[in-house]
Image (spheres, rainbow, N blue to C red):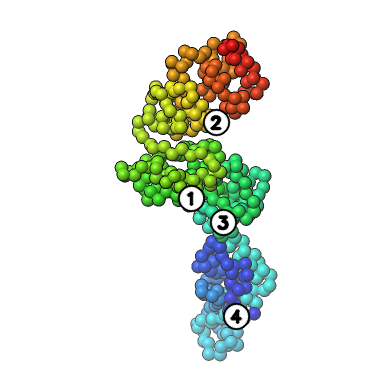
Amino acid sequence: MSNNINLIDSFQEFKEFKNIDRPTVISVLEEVFRSMIRRKYGTDENCDVIVNPDNGDLEIWRTRVVVEDEFSEDDDLEIELSAAHKFDPDLEVGDDYIEEITLESFGRRAILAARQTLVSKILELEKDEVFKKYKDREGELITGEVYQIWKKETLVLDDDGNELILPKTEQIPADYFKKGDSIRAVVHKVEMVNSNPRIIISRTAPEFLQRLFELEVPEIFDGLITIRKIVREPGERAKVAVESYDDRIDPVGACVGMKGSRIHGIVRELRNENIDVINYTNNNSLYIQRALSPARIGSIKLDDENKTAAVYLKSDQVSLAIGRGGHNIKLAGKLTGYEIDVYREADEVEEDVDIEEFADEIDSWIIDELKRVGLDTAKSVLALSVDDLVKRTDLEENTIQEIIQVLQAEFE
């Protein structure tokens, strides 16, 4: 083995470093060899370890003071004159004897131990670098490639080969992936688990929808339009409140684009999730009205202290306000911060029968469940199919069919 050894060529594992800069690697190499020197000679204070950061060449030089024969107190720091003259006859007492240490002198076992230590330290550094890199990127949009699919999560690799985890709970219900697919998501959570970085990505987080809007709508990216709040039922519906700082820009129109050109790409990415873009306003009544889109509201009574809103509308608008599975009214409540109750307008209710009137035939907990989803009259229940009623309530199909029979008998 030559005196000048090229460490990067010797240690094949470190020819390509994914996340660590070369100066850091060189400093680790130097420390590993200083540790070898301390084990062999007891100290590294009189040794110089020189690593060339450009090509990885290593030189180790050891300096000892020349002393008279039989006067050496520490052979690791001093060398007797007769021994020094074997290498350089011109040396005198008090001179520095400088020798180059080769790898062979450490022995095969020490070199293998150094190799193992080096591997361990580099892997540890690499894990720390991956953790720091992604911790700083929480909330950012990333693209990766699906590598492996399991029952509860999917393994995704980024461009550097780092492992990202997409749990089933962070996937849109309609998501379907196969190995090799390109996938977009946001960095949701980064944590250390048993000294390994665990990077969780998400496609259901509101930030994912926000980043997609920033990509598709230049006015948002430039700061002319601000997204005030996003609420989602992933794969079903989302509501996005936007505000413009320029009176000349219509924030809703800018987000939707000409004939829906801008929002169509986002909807496809979200597996046809319905997206309502709403113009934000400080007027709570108007804000709630917009949040319940596409339903047309008749009137609203607000209780700002208790954050509740009673919304009155025509019968044909009730199902629109509530939405399939109750998603529309639920998201409107989350967006505005108000608990919203839906009622039919008085003139229509008079022709109908309040659901409370059937308390002697229908259990009170069932009546409460119907009222919870805005079905407070007999006709509002009968206006929906059995399947719709099953989806909107927590009631069994048999129970709903019995209710319908009771209500229909009232109008026969």
Tag count in the figure? 4
Q: Looking at the picture, which amino acid does disc 2 mark? A: Arg
Q: Please identify the residue farthest to the front as the structure is shown.
A: 412
- Quick check: 269 above or below 313? below
Q: Which residue is mark 1?
A: 140
Q: Earlier in the sequence, mark 3 or mark 1?
A: 1
Q: CA distance from mark 3 to mark 2?
A: 37 Å
Q: Please identify the residue farthest to the left as the structure is shown.
A: 247
SS under mark 1: loop
Give percent across and percent down for residue 75. 59, 76
Q: Residue at x 54, y 56 (%)?
A: 130
Q: Earlier in the sequence, mark 4 or mark 3?
A: 4
Q: Looking at the picture, which amino acid does disc 1 mark? A: Glu
Q: Quadrant of residue 10?
A: bottom right
Q: Which residue is mark 3?
A: 158
Q: CA distance from mark 1 to mark 4?
A: 49 Å
Q: Which residue is mark 4?
A: 3
For label 3, the crowd category at 10 Å Cα-Cα, with few meaning under 14, some 14 to 19 and many 20 or more, is some
Q: CA distance from mark 2 to mark 4?
A: 77 Å
For label 4, the crowd category at 10 Å Cα-Cα, with few meaning under 14, some 14 to 19 and many 20 or more, is some
Q: Which residue is mark 2?
A: 324
